[in-house]
Image (tube, grey):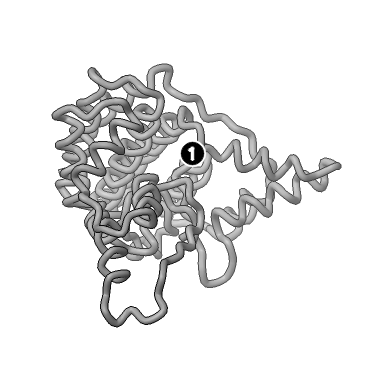
Amino acid sequence: MGGKVSYIGVLDFYAKGVAEVLSYEKKGNLIGYGSAPEGVENNEIVYELIFDAAWDSDAIDLDEWIEKYCLQKYGYYGEEMKAAMDLFQRSCYGDFTDHPRFWFQFRPSKRSQASAHRSREFFEAVEKFAAASDSCDSQLYQNDLVEMTAQYLGLVADNMIKDANRKIGRSRLEAYNEIYTLLCEIDALLASHPNLQLQRWVSFARAWGDSEQEKAYYESDAKRLITTWGPGVNEYAAKLWSGLVKDYYAARLLNDAQSRKKWQKFDILSWEENWINSVWKNSSKPYSNPVAASKELLEKYRKYAY
């Protein structure tokens, strides 16, 4: 749904459901299945499993399949990796919602709609996955660790928002300054991921224009698709992208908090339109060592997770 990157999906269902329905005695003319993946640069393990199931008439042994998946993708499936994958199955990959989003991705009045998976098992799964870094040094492992850590920290940011909203005055604004810092750290982490960057999206859009006016038009149109979208479906795409986290979600959040401190009304709709229609300049700087940064950030913010 919009290519949201939050981890979600019931792996056990995808592993067994296809074989079950295709062997059902009353299946009639049913001979296969289809998929409508709206934005596939997310939840890679889900799509790999869904399409693997098409080539097997029997239910897939999920434990065996996951081991092969990790060996093929990361070249490693040691104790920490296995523990992480078991915990993922018991948490985000044993759960489903069609619009997984974080609180910080919503306008302040809409945060009750947040639905990114949250559980102790998920936090533990990410920590176990990070612990495998001493034995696994593949680029694909680094990419996934960055993505997992960003989601872990996104849930931490949501926890900090809850706490901040219980405060008033200067203490509330100070709490939001800390949240802004965390979101900027998430942004820097995502800057090292090859796909999770606003820069790619904007560059693709601007490339279609022949004049600066056309380039600016295509850029604004592209930015609207991943933010306000249109009436009734605001925050639909909810990307966890470098550039977008810092310059849109974090900046919007801090502007709202600063306005409340001054007892002023923050015209959030005008702020959003201005961001969409202004030429964006990338200021996101990645960490020099994303794996080390991921582990440091997990340790730094762990107390806010549980």
| Residue plotted at (31% across, 56% down) | 9
Using the image as rendered, state which of residue 104 and residue 36 is in the foreground: 36
Whether residue 82 is situated above or below residue 102 in the rendered picture:
above
Q: Which residue lies furthest to the right in this view?
A: 211
Q: Name the residue under label 1.
A: 196
Q: Is residue 17 left or right of residue 147?
A: left
**Residue at image location 24% in from the left, 60% down from the top:** 16
Q: Nearer the viewer, residue 186 or 132?
A: 132
Q: Which residue is drawn at 59% across and 32% down?
A: 282
Q: Residues within 10 Å of mark 1 (few under 14, many from 20)?
A: many
Does the image show residue 244? yes
Element carrying mark 1: loop
Residue type (three-letter) at the residue carrying disc 1: Leu
Q: In this view, does 170 lie to the left or right of 207?
A: left
Image position of 233 (left or right of 15): right
Residue 130 x, y percent position in the rendering = 24, 29
Q: Position of residue 305 (x, y in %)?
A: 20, 42
